Amino acid sequence: MRMSVGVVGAREAADDTVALRLRDGRSLDPMPADDAVRLIGAVVAARSAELLPAR
């Protein structure tokens, strides 16, 4: 999986969201934690190495 970190800063905590930052420098928009877990689970289930298509 290309995800390197899930960010929960002050803004995300206030909004009950998490932002996923990818190793290649891209970031996903903040999303509810449940959605982030589902997205990561789908990548794992698909045995994909990519959270998003490559640039």
Image (cartoon, rainbow, N blue to C red):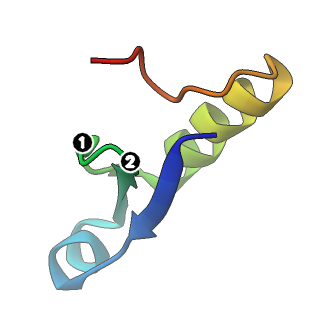
Q: Quadrant of the N terminus?
A: top right
Q: Residue at x 22, y 77 (%)?
A: 14
Identify the element where label 2 is drawn.
Answer: strand
Q: Quadrant of the C terminus?
A: top left
- Image coordinates for residue 51, horizontal then vertical, percent: 52, 29
- Disc 1 crowd rating (10 Å Cα; few below 14, some 14-19, many 20+) is few
Q: Along the horizontal axis of the image, is 47 left or right of 26?
A: right
Q: Along the horizontal axis of the image, is 44 left or right of 54?
A: right
**Mark 1 — residue?**
26
**Distance from Cα at disc 2 to Cα at disc 1:** 5 Å
Contact between marks 2 and 1 (CB within 8 A): the answer is yes
Q: Amino acid at mark 1?
A: Arg
Q: Residue at x 24, y 42 (%)?
A: 26
Q: Along the horizontal axis of the image, is 48 left or right of 9?
A: right
Q: Along the horizontal axis of the image, is 8 left or right of 9?
A: right
Q: Determine whether 18 is above or below 47 in the image.
A: below
Is residue 55 or residue 17 the one in the foreground? 55
| Extreme residue toward the bottom, this view | 10
**Mark 2 — residue?**
22
